[in-house]
């Protein structure tokens, strides 16, 4: 009888030892961090294709498991934040863009140049950053709270290319930093608050190519070591 009890206790300890790390990882992904891989060039020059990020899901609060409802909501997204969200036309697809308009904001964009509630986000010309395509024009964009690099095909805006949006309640408006090569809110509109996943936090891995045999794994020979553990214009 004692041997059976000891065997039962050993099995219970083994199960706890096996499932505890699994449970920890699931809770971590649900509440705190989510990995994300940059799929396109819409956020160049700050984020490159195959940059691997951690997304801080707890940046604005904690949602109920398997639900869009908040358990606790302790802060709100701010203009200039780089967020990951569910693409409105296809919620199974995740996008990453920079937040421009919050609920109630009036957004005006002239050929990629932004004005929110009548205030223009300033653009200061800079040389092409190292390793970037010199056929583009690069600027430091400042919205009054933060500054980061954006790029355009044209040095000066086309005065005929002006569009305006009034952001509805419960919705957000996003654009890419690669202003002339980004499919964003200018094309498909607003993102509901419930679609927000979290705030991009840090690049933990980056490479030029993925393995042909495993498209989700970086090719070790193409690692971009200098990008490891960088904020990439996210802060």
Image: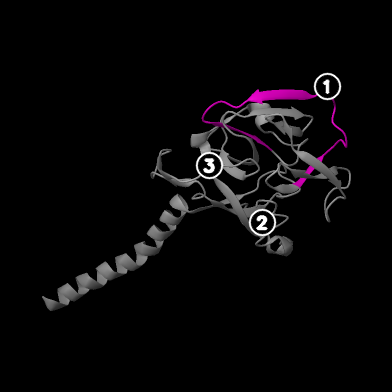
Magenta part of the protein: which range? 149-175
Q: Residue 171: x and y, percent?
A: 55, 30
Q: Which residue is drawn at 56% across and 31% down?
A: 103
Of mark 2 and mark 1, the one earlier in the sequence is: 1
- Occupied quadrant, residue 100: top right
Query: Tag 1, which secondary structure?
Result: loop
Please name the residue shown 73% across and 48% down the image: 147
Mark in the foreground, 3 or 1: 3
Q: Nearer the viewer, residue 208 or 134?
A: 134
Residue 214 visible at all: no
Residue that mark 1 sits on: 160
Disc 3 marks which residue?
76
* Relative to 27, 8 lies left or right: left
Q: Which residue is drawn at 83% across and 44% down?
A: 124
Q: Identify the disc placed on residue 231.
A: 2
Mark before the other along the chain sequence, 3 or 1: 3
């Amino acid at each position: 009888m004692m041997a059976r009890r000891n065997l039962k206790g050993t099995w219970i300890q083994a199960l706890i030892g096996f499932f505890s790390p699994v449970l920890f990882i699931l809770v971590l992904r649900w509440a705190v961090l989510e990995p994300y891989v940059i799929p396109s060039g819409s956020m160049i020059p700050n984020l490159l294709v195959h940059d691997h990020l951690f997304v801080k899901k707890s940046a604005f609060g904690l949602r109920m498991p398997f639900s869009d409802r908040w358990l606790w909501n302790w802060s709100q997204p701010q203009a200039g934040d780089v967020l990951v969200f569910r693409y409105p036309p296809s919620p199974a697809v995740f996008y990453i863009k920079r937040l421009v308009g919050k609920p109630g904001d009036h957004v005006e964009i002239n050929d990629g140049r932004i004005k929110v509630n009548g205030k223009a986000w300033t653009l200061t010309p800079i040389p092409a950053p190292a390793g970037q395509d010199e056929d583009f024009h690069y600027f430091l964009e400042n919205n009054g709270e933060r500054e980061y690099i954006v790029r355009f095909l044209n040095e000066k805006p086309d005065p005929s290319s002006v569009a305006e949006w009034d952001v509805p309640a419960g919705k957000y408006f996003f654009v890419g930093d690669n202003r002339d090569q980004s499919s964003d809110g200018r094309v498909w509109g607003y993102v509901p608050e419930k679609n927000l996943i979290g705030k991009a936090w840090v690049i933990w891995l980056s490479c030029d190519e993925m393995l042909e045999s495993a498209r989700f794994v970086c090719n070790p020979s193409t690692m971009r070591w200098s990008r490891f553990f960088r904020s990439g214009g996210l802060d």
